[in-house]
Amino acid sequence: TTGEVKQTIRVGDRPTSVTTGSGVVWIASSSANTIWRVDPRSGAVRAVTGLKEPRDMAIAADDVYVVTRDAIGRIDEKTAALAKAVNEEQSCGGPVIGAGKAGLWIADAGGCHSPARGASRNQYLNVARRLSVFDDPPPETAADRIWIPRQRNQAHDLQYYSDLAVGNDAVWVVGDNFEQVVWRLDPRARTAARTALPGAPLEVAIGAGGIWVTALVDDRVWRVDPVTRRVVAAIPVG
């Protein structure tokens, strides 16, 4: 690979999120209230409307799950048809979403202190698990949740999650500019392990034997060892 730009496809105003699956690229624009389905082979672009302020996206069980302003939308990956949304009680920051072998995960924070109304595993096609930050211990009915303890001081005042990735038998969630950490969530033990980062994180990805976290302001990428959960490299990129 050369890293060169091979093709430019116009999709509309201010694309903000992207995911891929089955040879198709899905692009969201919160400002345009639109999801675009792009076939990179033919260059065909199809607009999917009807979702308010689409933000983050993930693909699971042949569907595209979309975090919107007030729900989790679902689009058929093959037909691009909208399916029934799952109502979601969200924080002002909105949740982040990711999918992998461990299933479909949604993490939310910043004042969302009660379970989603009317949401169950079956409504997520038995592939969803919900992550939330709560002040109180988890109730017995929350078997599908991993509870992340909130830090109670000004230096660590979590407002929202900035990204989520699923891989290496875990779910990895990064905080915001106040909570400069990456969490490793164990789906089997339902535990959360915290790793401090050198600065504010923005996004997280998994591959090439590492957990990769982009810095919000430092123009660098941190590599986290998935076994030791230690930051082992800081790579300048700007």
Image (tube, rainbow, N blue to C red):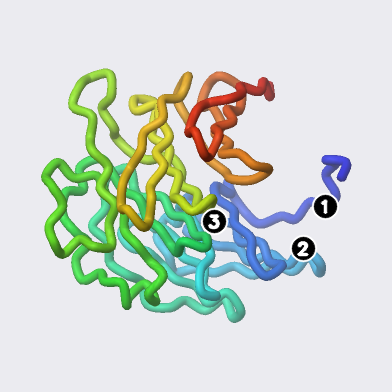
Q: CA distance from mark 1 to mark 2?
A: 8 Å
In the depicted structure, whether residue 202 falls above or below residue 63: above
Residue in front for this viewpoint, 89 or 230: 230
Marker disc for residue 40: 2
Q: CA distance from mark 2 to mark 3?
A: 16 Å
Q: Residue furthest right?
A: 2
- Pointer 2 or 3: first along the chain: 3
Q: CA distance from mark 1 to mark 3?
A: 19 Å
Mark 1, secondary structure of its residue: loop
Give neighbour class at mark 2: few <14, some 14-19, many 20+ (Cα, 10 Å).
some
Mark 2, secondary structure of its residue: loop
Q: Which residue is mark 1?
A: 7
Residue in front for this viewpoint, 224 or 162: 224
Identify the amino acid type marked 1. Answer: Gln
Q: Which residue is mark 3?
A: 28
In the depicted structure, whether residue 145 falls above or below residue 78: above
User: Residue, x 20% and y 42% (percent of image)?
Assistant: 111
- Pointer 1 or 3: first along the chain: 1
Marker disc for residue 177: none
